[in-house]
Image: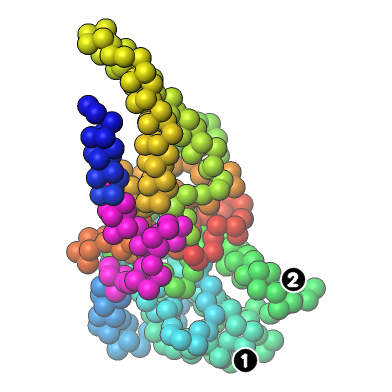
């Protein structure tokens, strides 16, 4: 093949790949082709919201719900803690809790204990405060207050805002950690098998509990086989975990080096075989090697890093499974659980491929890192 023909063929393939990447990488925040204007368009989560709204209108809002009791079930499998603050735009709490319970069977619902913390310093300012539907969805409601009179009438559990007794600042990170620790402690006292910390702005897929149990079985089996304990399991996948991560730069470097080495080796082998058969001139072979090493391969790398993992994953989508989360890495690993409220949502007829936002932890330790909403 003449070098000119090779160049023409390469550019045709390269520009085709670039156009394909442009059309498929618009929703990856780390991509060169990212478009914030359309990246957050909701599809499947909007459908789930409609389903949850129908459930709330049918089962929750019209019913006067009795106050919850302290009866502990024997098979309490999962305790879910949900911190919530009042929002100025809209209230997500009903959709969050509703999407967690709307498809559960009575037996599955009995295996779950849901604790909601109205985390405002003045709980009466929270849009859900005093609403009857809150106890139709949650099992326990916690509030901060220095006056327990009103809350006791509502059967809320009242906690002092200064939960540590040593002052509480207005620092956002500190308050998030304290809110999480309050929910963790409330669930720990119930001694469930697992504890989940979920933010108040997610939408769960209809089969989240089934997929959660399958994931837990798998991670427990892997931990047993490896003779290692585990602390938390991330279930929701945020857009900030998509694309290339700085923590994995050495992995990318290894792939680049291996790719270069393998390609050059294959070309050398092919040219050597061709030279034996057709007496190819050595200078022509070296010209092809220079084209590949200094021209084709770098452009291929630019195209790949422009497309990023999101577009490349459209070619090969592995089944949902478990992977070990590297120490310090942002790349969450379990793609199991919920309808994504934003990035790369699937068609309205299919569950989300990349779950988003929140995480699951077990009550063997507490680590708020990675338990934030994306």
Quick check: 222 left or right of 10? right
Q: Position of residue 306 (x, y in %)?
A: 40, 51
On whether residue 301 falls in the magenta region, the answer is no
* Mark 1 residue element: helix
Answer few, some or many: residues within 10 Å of disc 2's Cα (few below 14, many 20 plus, some between 14 and 19).
Answer: few
Q: Which residue is mark 1?
A: 149
Looking at the picture, the colour scheme in use is: rainbow
Looking at the image, which is closer to me, 302 or 182? Answer: 302
Q: Position of residue 342 (x, y in %)?
A: 37, 68
Quadrant of the drawing holding the N terminus: top left
The number of discs equals 2
Q: Which residues are magenta?
A: 17-46
Circle 2 residue = 164
Q: CA distance from mark 2 to mark 1?
A: 22 Å
Residue 62 place in picture, x, y as percent? 30, 89
Q: Which mark is residue 86?
A: none
Q: Is residue 93 visible?
A: yes
| Residue 85: % across, % down | 54, 80
Q: Residue at x 56, y 46 (%)?
A: 247
Q: Residue at x 53, y 73 (%)?
A: 83
Pick the front one: 326 or 231 = 326
Label 2, secondary structure: give it.
Answer: loop
Residue 168, compared with residue 240, is above or below; it is: below
Name the residue located 64 percent from the left edge and 66 percent from the top edge. 177
């Amino acid at each position: 093949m003449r070098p000119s023909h090779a160049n023409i063929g390469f550019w045709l393939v390269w520009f085709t790949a670039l156009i394909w990447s442009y059309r498929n990488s618009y929703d990856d925040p780390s991509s060169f082709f990212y478009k914030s204007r359309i990246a957050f368009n909701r599809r499947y989560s909007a459908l789930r919201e409609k389903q949850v709204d129908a459930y709330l209108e049918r089962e929750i809002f019209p019913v006067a719900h009795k106050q919850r009791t302290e009866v502990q079930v024997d098979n309490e499998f999962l305790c879910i803690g949900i911190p919530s603050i009042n929002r100025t735009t809209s209230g997500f709490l009903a959709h969050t809790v509703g999407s967690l319970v709307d498809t559960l069977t009575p037996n599955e619902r009995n295996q779950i204990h849901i604790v909601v913390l109205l985390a405002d310093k003045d709980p009466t300012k929270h849009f859900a405060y005093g609403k009857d539907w809150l106890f139709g969805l949650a099992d326990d409601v916690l509030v901060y207050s220095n006056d327990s009179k009103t809350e006791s009438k509502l059967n809320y559990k009242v906690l002092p805002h200064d939960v540590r007794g040593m002052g509480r600042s207005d620092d956002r990170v500190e308050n998030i950690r304290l809110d999480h620790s309050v929910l963790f402690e409330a669930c720990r006292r119930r001694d469930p098998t697992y504890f989940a910390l979920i933010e108040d702005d997610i939408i769960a897929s209809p089969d989240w509990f089934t997929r959660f149990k399958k994931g837990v079985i798998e991670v427990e089996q892997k931990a047993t086989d490896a003779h290692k304990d585990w602390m938390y399991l991330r279930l929701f996948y945020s857009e900030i975990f998509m694309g290339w991560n700085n923590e994995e730069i050495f992995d990318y470097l290894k792939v680049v080096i291996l790719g270069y080495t393998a390609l050059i080796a294959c070309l050398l082998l092919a040219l050597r075989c061709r030279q034996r058969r057709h007496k190819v001139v050595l200078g022509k072979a070296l010209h092809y090697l220079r084209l590949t090493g200094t021209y084709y391969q770098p452009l291929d790398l630019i195209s790949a890093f422009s497309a990023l993992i999101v577009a490349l994953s459209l070619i090969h989508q592995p089944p949902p499974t478990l992977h070990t989360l590297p120490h310090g890495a942002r790349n969450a690993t379990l793609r199991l659980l919920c309808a994504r409220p934003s990035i790369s949502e699937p068609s309205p007829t299919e569950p989300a491929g990349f779950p988003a936002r929140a995480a699951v932890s077990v009550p063997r330790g507490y680590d708020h890192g990675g338990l934030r909403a994306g």
